[in-house]
Amino acid sequence: MLSGLGLVTGLPSSRFSIDNNPPKFSIPGVTDPVVLDLLNSQTTTYEMTLLQDPFENAIRPIERVKSLQTQKSILIGAIPELVSSYNIFTNAYEIIAFHQEFSYTPILTQVGQDSVFFNVSIRRNGSLYGIVMVKNSTVPYPRQMKYGLDSTNFLLDPEHFINLSFVYPSDNRGESVIYQIGNFTNLYDNTEYDAYFIADNDLPINPDLMDDDEILKVSFQTETEIFIIPDTYRATFGERITERWILMTIMLLTIIILI
């Protein structure tokens, strides 16, 4: 079947995703010609999706489907079982995927000496990507960010990169948003950083990634590390005075002896 569809549309079979492939109804052991003729006369409906390739300068998928109807004679030659009276085009519909959006600018919720936490959300099904870099570093392109790369295509520290998936309930019509907490670790203390965020939607072939001007930036500075000296290594004021007089006495004795 897929080879017949490819023959008419000129597309590889990988572009057709079969969504429903029901088995043809049968009754085991039946030999009655009337029953067999009845069973063979029943039709089976297959449902599939024609996937668009965003890197191909081609016509829309719905136009490809139209060609299946206008060239049905060729299609029937490749798939003899096809019901000739079935109108493929009028029973097809086009799915429009909306561009991804952020629900709000990522919110800095907690920052420590070597870690930071952000509350993040996107409006539609897809993935959110985030990276953190020392302040004033060269900003990577969105596709580099998606794979955790810096501007020179070197991998960032895995702890400086997040990839979060968002899946909304089918009955959610933009009435509520899903949020997640993303965090970056293994940071330097008392250092200024820039966090960058980008996202895409869940298109089957190649998710539609946001553009350069849609990258969101949030700057922050990690806390300064505090060193606490244990009590066993500290002396009281009186102890320090006593130690100083002992040292001065030893120096005087040394001077006297030398004289």
Image: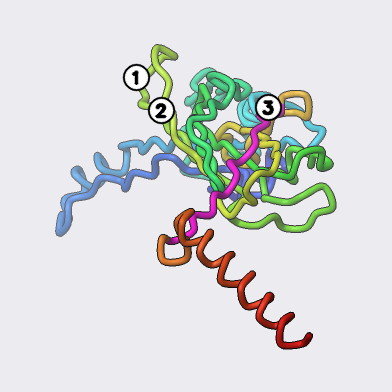
Q: Main secondary structure of the magenta part?
A: loop
Res. 100 visible in picture: yes
Q: Which residues are magenta?
A: 215-230
- Is residue 224 shown in magenta? yes
Discs 3/1, front? 3
Discs 3/2, front? 3
Residue at 63% from the left image edge and 34% from the top image edge: 73
Q: Amino acid at mark 3?
A: Leu
In terms of sequence position, does the residue under pointer 3 or pointer 2 come before the other? Answer: 2
Mark 3, secondary structure of its residue = strand
How many angstroms separate mark 3 from mark 2 (CA)?
22 Å
For this view, does 128 lie left or right of residue 30?
right
Residue at 68% from the left image edge and 27% from the top image edge: 216
Q: Which residue is mark 2?
A: 168
- Is residue 145 shown in magenta? no
Name the mark on residue 171: 1
At which x and y percent is residue 251? 68, 76
Q: Which residue is mark 3?
A: 216
At which x and y percent is residue 87? 52, 23
In terms of sequence position, does the residue under pointer 3 or pointer 1 come before the other? Answer: 1
Mark 2, secondary structure of its residue = loop
Which class describes the residues within 10 Å of circle 1: few (<14), some (14-19), or many (20+)?
Answer: few
